[in-house]
Image (tube, rainbow, N blue to C red):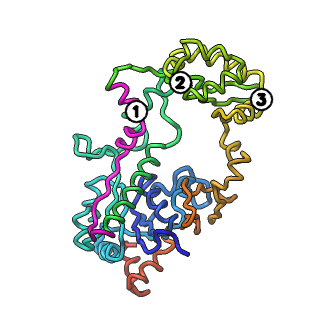
């Protein structure tokens, strides 16, 4: 049985994360996705190279289940190929600036002239309207402008997250919007534009902090790993590593105080609710730190886990790969790729459907691997494909 999106055709002009991972999620649940790259390969193919061909770890993660063609839509011959591709597609994904979309004739009006019910899924750095609408940016720009970086670390200097959560969050929003647009098209027959923005995603993820500031002007400052609105909430040293413990809500605090042997704290007005416990977080964290310092990481997380208190070890990347729960849960699939010294552990879509599960079916494509196949399906014969290649269109 095919995936839930079987029959949906997607052109992926995405670059880096927000566009390509949106298309990957659609592919994982059955859509046919064709990644369109520059003739010498798009820049995101080569980020953090791990293979002999220069393909990077990021590319391997977010381009499985896709076909790949090379195409230069700025050439007249390339425009004809583009026209044929769009005419047989349902969705075009392109996280490119508006001016670039227009130059490549990937803007909505140009696409709609070819296929009236087409869905265009885009993502920009800043969204619009606004004075920065045409500016470009990466994940970190959203992080720093949302308040998240200001609140991370000890404040001098501020720290951005090492992982691109803004990019991946934008991809998730774009995939959600694309599915909603497909449902609407099924009802009305209309296509539309789906717009995501890195800054919008970052502001969404930090929104509760922004609401608190706007409503009561609390003017919070960064406090490292120490939580501010509940306690204990911190990262604690053990005899052989570190653990995070995070207690929010009265039921969890009751269980934690009993485990610590601090039942009297339940009647202490300093600890009567989450906010007061957050205000007195250093005192509570000192008690937790003493407890953790007497135990190994494994002993601490197992004891806390049995007490139903949220806790986890701080793992290195290798420790994450080796962790027994991560391995047993099947979150990642080993994927071979030409030129890799070892298979790549590629994370599956982080959501599972009981009746129509997605899956990693094919490895990421090599550059232009499916150009001849796809063009043949568009009606080009061998001589025509050779002529396109000679003209530099593919």
Mark 1 surroundings: few (<14), some (14-19) or many (≥20) residues within 10 A = few
- Badge 2 crowding class, 10 Å Cα cut-off, few under 14, some 14 to 19, many 20 or more, is many
Q: Quadrant of residue 203?
A: top left
Q: Which residue is mark 1?
A: 208
By secondary structure, the bulk of the magenta-drawn segment is best described as helix
In the structure shown, which secondary structural element does the residue marked by tag 3 occupy? loop
Depth check: 152 or 188 in front?
188
State the extent of the magenta-drawn residues as a range: 186-214
Q: Quadrant of residue 266?
A: top right
Q: Compared to 104, does 292 lie above or below?
A: above
| Residue drawn at (38%, 19%) of the image | 218
Image coordinates of residue 162 in percent, x first then y, are: 53, 38
- Residue 324 higher or lower than 357, as above or below: above
Residue at the spot 51% in from the left edge and 61% down from the top edge: 63
User: Which numbered disc flags the more N-terminal residue, 1 or 2?
Assistant: 1
Horizontally, is 90 left or right of 289 in the view? left
Horizontal relation, residue 186 to residue 24: left or right: left
Q: Could you tell me how far apart the alpha carbons at marks 1 and 2 are, in whole angstroms? A: 15 Å
Residue at mark 2: 230
């Amino acid at each position: 049985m095919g995936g839930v999106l079987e029959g949906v055709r997607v052109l992926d002009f995405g670059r880096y994360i927000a566009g390509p991972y949106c298309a990957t999620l659609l592919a994982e649940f059955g859509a046919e996705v064709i990644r369109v790259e520059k003739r010498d390969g798009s820049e995101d193919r080569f980020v953090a190279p791990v293979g002999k061909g220069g393909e990077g770890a990021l590319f391997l993660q977010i381009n499985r289940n896709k076909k790949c063609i090379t195409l230069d839509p700025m050439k007249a011959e390339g425009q004809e190929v583009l026209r044929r591709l769009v005419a047989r597609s349902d969705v075009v994904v392109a996280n490119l600036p508006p001016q670039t979309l227009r130059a490549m004739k990937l803007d909505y009006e140009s696409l709609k002239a070819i296929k009236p019910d087409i869905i265009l899924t885009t993502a920009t750095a800043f969204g619009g309207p606004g004075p920065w609408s045409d500016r470009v940016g990466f994940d970190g720009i959203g992080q720093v402008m949302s308040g998240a970086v200001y609140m991370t670390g000890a404040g001098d200097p501020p720290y951005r997250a090492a992982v691109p959560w803004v990019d991946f969050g934008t991809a998730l929003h774009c995939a959600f919007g694309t599915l909603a647009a497909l449902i609407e098209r099924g009802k009305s027959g209309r296509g539309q534009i789906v717009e995501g923005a890195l800054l919008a995603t970052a502001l969404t993820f930090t929104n509760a902090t922004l609401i608190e500031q706007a409503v009561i002007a609390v003017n919070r400052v960064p406090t490292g790993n120490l939580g501010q609105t509940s306690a204990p909430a911190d990262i604690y040293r053990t005899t052989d590593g570190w653990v995070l413990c995070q207690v929010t809500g009265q039921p969890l605090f009751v269980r934690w105080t009993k485990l610590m042997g601090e039942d009297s704290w339940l009647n202490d007005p300093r600890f009567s609710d989450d906010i007061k416990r957050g205000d007195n977080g250093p005192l509570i964290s000192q008690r937790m730190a003493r407890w953790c310092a007497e135990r190994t990481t494994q002993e601490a997380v197992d004891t806390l886990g049995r007490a139903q208190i949220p806790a986890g070890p701080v793992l290195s990347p290798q420790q994450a790969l080796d962790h027994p729960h991560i391995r047993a849960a099947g979150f990642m699939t080993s994927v071979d790729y030409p030129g890799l010294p070892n298979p790549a552990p590629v994370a599956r879509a982080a959501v599972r459907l009981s009746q129509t599960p997605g899956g990693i079916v094919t490895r990421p494509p090599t550059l232009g691997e499916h150009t001849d196949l796809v063009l043949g399906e568009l009606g080009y014969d061998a001589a025509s494909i050779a002529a396109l290649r000679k003209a530099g269109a593919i």
